[in-house]
Image (spheres, rainbow, N blue to C red):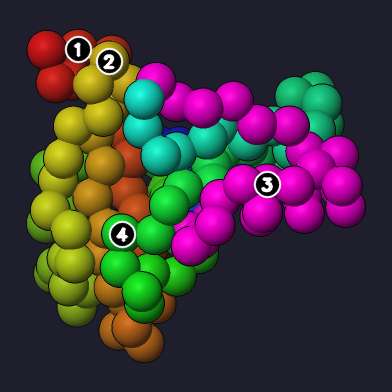
Amino acid sequence: MNTRVVHFEIPCDNPEKVMSFFKETFGWSFKQFGNEQHWLTITGDEKTPGIDEGVMEKRDPNLPVVNSINVDNIDEAVKKVEKAGGKFVVSKMPIPSIGWLAYFSDPDANIHGIYQHDPSSGK
């Protein structure tokens, strides 16, 4: 089973300002995801270790930076998270044509995402 961190999100009040900061500081590039207030982030050469992903407009003032963990089956992962003492803060939702995503808090109240790749999601 592949359970590596595969995605991160940086929620912010002013995405353009944050993207400008990371572009200037680290050379990251950004591409808006459809019409969403979410920008795909390229952090470097895909042949080197590391992960890419996103900057997004905050949905809540307390929304933290979130790392998402790849899972083979999100429904099974939800059960495992709950059995181990995690609590879901955002239920399973489709990312159309990409996969499924849910957010949970661990026993120390840190927020994480779980992600299942599934191009047929949301269709």
Image quadrant in which you'd find residue 119? top left
Q: Could one spot residue 73 in this view of the protein?
A: no
Which residue is labeled 1 in the image? 120
Determine contact: label 4, label 3, CB under 8 Å.
no
Crowding around mark 1 (Cα neighbors within 10 Å: few <14, some 14 to 19, many 20+) is few
Q: Residue at x 75, y 24 (%)?
A: 46
Q: Is residue 91 left or right of residue 25?
A: left
Q: Is residue 37 left or right of residue 21?
A: left
Q: Magenta residues?
A: 10-34
Q: Quadrant of the N terminus?
A: top left
Residue nearest the viewer, comparing 53 with 112: 53
Look at discs 2 and 3 and give the one toward the viewer.
3
Q: Secondary structure at mark 1?
A: loop
Q: Could one spot residue 75 in this view of the protein?
A: yes
Percent position of residue 76, x then y: 15, 45
Classify 50 as above or below 80: above
Alpha-carbon span between mark 3 and mark 1: 30 Å
Alpha-carbon span between mark 4 and mark 2: 22 Å
Sequence-wise, the earlier of marks 1 and 4 is 4
Alpha-carbon span between mark 4 and mark 3: 17 Å
Residue type highlighted by circle 3:
Met
Residue at the limit of the structure toward the bottom, as seen here: 108
Which residue is labeled 4 in the image? 59
The total number of labels drawn is: 4
Crowding around mark 2 (Cα neighbors within 10 Å: few <14, some 14 to 19, many 20+) is few
Determine contact: label 1, label 2, CB under 8 Å.
yes
Image quadrant in which you'd find residue 47? top right
Residue 97 badge: 2
Residue nearest the viewer, comparing 84 with 49: 49
Alpha-carbon span between mark 1 and mark 2: 5 Å
